[in-house]
Image: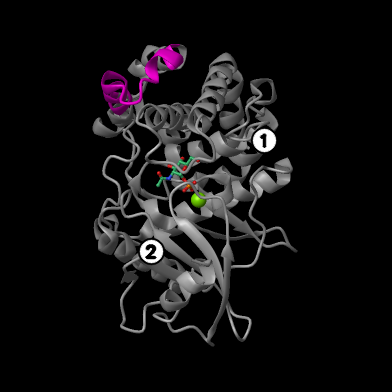
Amino acid sequence: MEINDLLRPVAEAFPLDAAFDSAQRLGNGHINQTRLVQDAAGGKYVFQRINDGVFQDVDLLMNNIFAITSYLNQKKPGSSLVFLRTKQGNTYFRSGLGCFRAYRFVEGLCMEKAETPQLFETCGMAFGDFQNALGGFDASLLGETIPRFHDTVKRVSDLEQAALSDKCGRLKGVRAEYDFYLERRSEAGKMLDMLAKGELKKRVTHNDTKLNNVILDAETLRPRCVIDLDTVMPGLAGNDFGDCIRSGATTGAEDEQDLSKVSLDTRLYRAFARGFLGACGRELSRREIETLPLGAKLMTYECGARFLTDYLNGDTYFHIAYPEHNLVRCRTQMKLVADTEARWGEIKDIILQEADS
Ligand code: GN1
Ligand code: MG
């Protein structure tokens, strides 16, 4: 069925400003399905079918999102997404096609690649501001939308489980990749250990700070807002810093097949650190600041392990465009981890210099 026909009854469940007009695909998310909807008066909305295999408690997920966005918009009007309740007053609409939510579209620039260090610095500001603005939010009001989401130790165990069952017979083709992850597993729990010892603070964090989850104003190039709020929950500052470095401080795309095009870009690293620390550095303890390079390494390591796990499990989690897609993604992450290790001293210096400047 045509996408417009599919979405029409869904759109009609929400109080749009005018009648539903059309729908088209939007964005490159790996989890939910996203459409841009227009009404007859030109109003624009984003409709998403929530992946309820990934987010098993959709009520909890949407309660989190309404709580956070209302808080942020109350603090600073227009600083966060505006979600619509259904005509029935619910936070999402459940139909035979799945669970749908809607928010007002935010015009702006959404980058798949950090075009310049200045633009990446602005992304740093956006995620730093986000964390800062949620500093006063009572974390006990939020549920865990995906339990143990950034528990890297668990992610490595999941990889090991996937290799043990080897459902698709793919392990023999990815021994080198698998070994790469196992060799580094002793590092996986470093931040969680610090948290357990009380050295780090549990904050309200975004947890999916991918470059393309920031919208910039196309004219002023200032941050407009942070999107993809599904994983906003208690977490660590280093992880929010880390996931954007993973996705943005690189010379190649997450799914670049030619690994000679993929390397860690330390100019971009510095630019992001400047934006991020400028926006939330005063809130962070020295210990948290010292963990930022480790956060970046572990987020890259963890994400690559997740891609490999999904490849071994038969690609049931991340959307893929071709059969080896998750393996290709895993390899770019390995390349970035290896680069991070090779340039560890330089990276640590960048963070300390930016923190003290
Ligand atoms: C997913 O949906 P998207 O593309 O923003 C994933 C992130 C990964 C990312 C890798 C809920 O994010 O954790 O880092 O893909 N989100 C979830 O590209 O698993
Ligand atoms: Mg996204």
Q: Are there few (<14), some (14-19), or many (20+) residues within 10 Å of tag 2?
A: many
- Left or right of 82 in this view: 143: left
Which disc is residue 43 wearing?
A: none
Front in this rendered view, residue 287 or 113: 113
Residue 63 location (% of width, % of height) = 30, 65
Q: Which residue is mark 1?
A: 268
Give the crowd class for mark 1: few <14, some 14-19, many >=20 residues within 10 Å.
many
The part of the chain drawn in magenta is 157-175
Q: Is residue 73 visible?
A: yes
Near-viewer residue (148 or 169): 169
Residue 290 pos. (x, y %): 47, 30
Indicate whether 147 appears above or below 153. Answer: below
Q: Horizontally, is 42 left or right of 90 in the view?
A: right
Residue at point 52%, 67% (across, down): 3
Amino acid, disc 2: Ile
Identified at 56% across, 50% down, the residue is: 28
Residue 278 visible in the snapshot: no
Spatial CA span between label 2 and label 1: 29 Å
| Type of the residue with mark 1 | Leu
Q: For residue 164, which quarter of the picture? A: top left
Verify whether residue 171 appears in magenta.
Answer: yes
Decide: marks 2, 1 in contact (CB < 8 A)? no
Position of residue 157 measured from the top left corner of the image (x, y, whole percent): 28, 25
From the viewer's perspective, is residue 278 above or below residue 93? above
Please tell me which residue is depicted at 31% across the width and 29% down the height of the picture: 194
Residue at the farthest front position: 1
Looking at the rendering, the quadrant in which ligand 1 lies is top left
Left or right: where 131 falls relative to 204: right
- Determine whether the residue tagged by mark 1 lies in a helix, strand or loop: helix
The residue where tag 2 is placed is 68
Q: Is residue 357 magenta?
A: no
Identify which residue, 177 or 166, lies in the foreground: 166
